[in-house]
Amino acid sequence: MCFISEDHVLAAIAHFFPESLDNSRVLTARDDDCAVLHAVDPLCVSTDLFIEDVHFRRRYFSHEDAGWKALAVNLSDLAACGAKPLGFSLGLGLPRNAGMDLLHGLLRGMAELARWAGIPLIGGDLSRSDKLYLCITVVGEAVRPLRRGEAKPGDTLFAIGQTGLARTGFLRPEADGPAAPRPPGGARRREKRPDPGGCGGFGPPLCGGTVRSPSRRPWCRRPCR
């Protein structure tokens, strides 16, 4: 296992997240002091940590799964606000025993989800850490952000997908370890590879107007599963 330098990390980021000159919303390159975004509507910003042995364990999370979920938990907040993703930053802490397989797996899983969501990596920071540590901040915009405090008694609430599957996928390995029987109903996949946008993807919240069918939602980038 070779020592991973900052140059190795930056080269891997450039490989999995090539910068595009076609994105009119991102006005600076990643090597600038700050990311500068062009926003038309109100901005929605969310940050989440994803820390080894606190939020996940590498013994039952693949490197790709960890990269996917670290971004997914942030994107789900944008989806809850009805926001369209504009960009995200990555704070990455790598343990000293990390190899290139870990680095490439993390970025590969994260890039797969980023391509689906149409969100570029716009900056971040690197450091050494005792455990694998990821801190992601996402930025999106929404014409009318949907906030928790706007819910009123008598409103109708909708749950997308099967509730409880991700929790089941988390608790079974925690209780029984690597020998745990396979959780039922796709629970393991929901825990490791959650769909951050639900069936509706990202875009205007379905409230205060006519509910449209999934096939007519212009912000939905893949079929519901």
Image: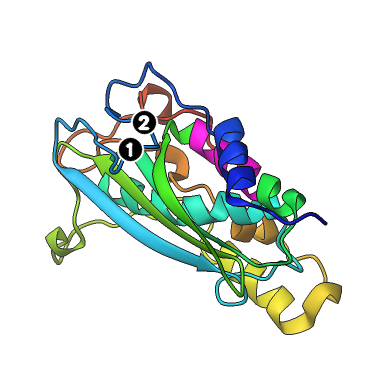
Residue type beneath disc 2:
Ala
Q: Is residue 220 above or below residue 21?
A: below
Question: What is the x, y in percent for residue 161?
Answer: 50, 51
Q: How far across and how far down the image is residue 66, in percent?
A: 62, 57
Badge 1 is on which residue? 32
Q: Can residue 90 be seen in this view?
A: no
The residue located at (42%, 30%) in the rendering is 220
Counting from the top left corner in percent of width and height, residue 2 is at: 79, 54
Q: What residue type is labelled 1?
A: Asp
Vertical arrangement, residue 207 with respect to residue 162, above or below: above
Q: Tell me if residue 109 is in the magenta stretch.
A: yes
Rendered residue at 68%/67% (across/down): 96
Mark 1: few, some, or many residues within 10 Å (few <14, many ≥20)? few
Is 144 drawn above or below residue 135 in the view shown?
Answer: above
Q: Give the range drawn in magenta.
A: 106-115
Report the predominant secondary structure element of the magenta stretch: helix
- In the picture of the structure, the residue carrying the numbered disc 2 is 29
Residue 94 falls in which quadrant of the image? bottom right
